Image: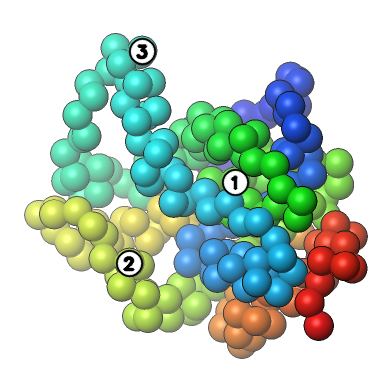
Amino acid sequence: MTSHNSLADSEVRDPFGTLRRALWIGGGQWAGKSTVARLLAVQYCITVYHYDYHDARGHNDRRIARRVDLGEPTTEPDPDKVWVHTTPEEMATTTLAGFPDRFEWALDDLRALVSGHPIIAEGWGLRPELVAPIIDSPRRMVVMVPTPEFRQHQLQELPRAASLGHRVSDPARAQANRLTRDRLVAEDAVRTAHQLGIRVIEVDGSRDAAAIAEIVADHFSPYLPEQDRKP
């Protein structure tokens, strides 16, 4: 299922050097990426970019504009067609194929950031194969993925995980399709990370968010100046 585009053959525009100095947390849905990033922001005086927030809001206008350029319909597709009548495998393939364009929009956001502190970008669309050509070391990225058991735990604890957010004719099937899609997309991220030598952290719930944050901080330690750390 893997379908990867790469920026390796082109020079990435980085006017302020923000992209190459950034730290990246990618991986699967519901692994706790945003929580870990927030903890690190407070503890290490880090600037955090939440990919999912921008992708669900500011980037939607870009998606519509892109459809106009391609001569595609600008209205959202029927939710049943997307979530009920499409197989998880097809959904995963479509999601993976859309990540490169969405990543470019995230890079545009990040290019506008200049900070005296380290910048962490986190989100499931920050794919290893897209980030790898930008970074100078695999230690600038980590991939977090939930185990099946922890994903089920998140579904019970997080309302946004348990709710699809769309009205469909078969909510149970739509949710099952969504969960399988998310698993397939996460598995693809793990495979790619291993191929690129990028660290994968499997989140199984045996360690709390603070403990996972410390593991991530240790991984990023070469890029966290001592004076930026709090006791």
Task: Tell me the CA gap for discs 1 and 3.
Answer: 25 Å
Q: Secondary structure at mark 1?
A: loop
Q: Which residue is mark 3?
A: 69
**Looking at the picture, how far across and down is residue 2, in whole percent?**
57, 40
| 48 w.r.t. 219: above or below | above
Q: Which residue is at a point 44% across and 43% down the rendered structure image? A: 55
Q: Secondary structure at mark 3?
A: helix
- Residues at badges 1 and 3 in contact (C-beta under 8 Å)? no
Q: Is residue 188 left or right of residue 229?
A: left
**Looking at the picture, how far across and down is residue 81, in whole percent?**
19, 41
Q: Amino acid at mark 3?
A: Asp
In the depicted view, which residue is nearer to us: 34 or 204? 34
Q: Which residue is mark 1?
A: 126
| 69 w.r.t. 213: above or below | above
**Looking at the picture, how far across and down is residue 103, in whole percent?**
56, 36
- Residues at badges 3 and 2 in contact (C-beta under 8 Å)? no
| 78 w.r.t. 36: above or below | above
Q: Amino acid at mark 1?
A: Leu
Q: Which residue is mark 2?
A: 160
In the depicted view, which residue is nearer to us: 183 or 231? 231
Q: Amino acid at mark 2?
A: Arg
Q: Residues within 10 Å of mark 3 (few under 14, many from 20)?
A: few
Q: Is residue 6 left or right of residue 222?
A: left
In the depicted view, which residue is nearer to us: 141 or 198? 141
Q: Which residue is at a point 44% across and 56% down the rendered structure image? A: 182
For the question of whether residue 3 can be seen, the reply is: no
Q: Secondary structure at mark 2?
A: helix
Q: Which residue is at a point 13% across and 54% down the rendered structure image? A: 167
For the question of whether residue 86 can be seen, the reply is: yes
Task: Answer with the quarter of the image where residue 180 lies.
Answer: bottom left
Task: Tell me the CA gap for discs 3 and 2.
Answer: 32 Å
**Looking at the picture, how far across and down is residue 136, in whole percent?**
86, 41
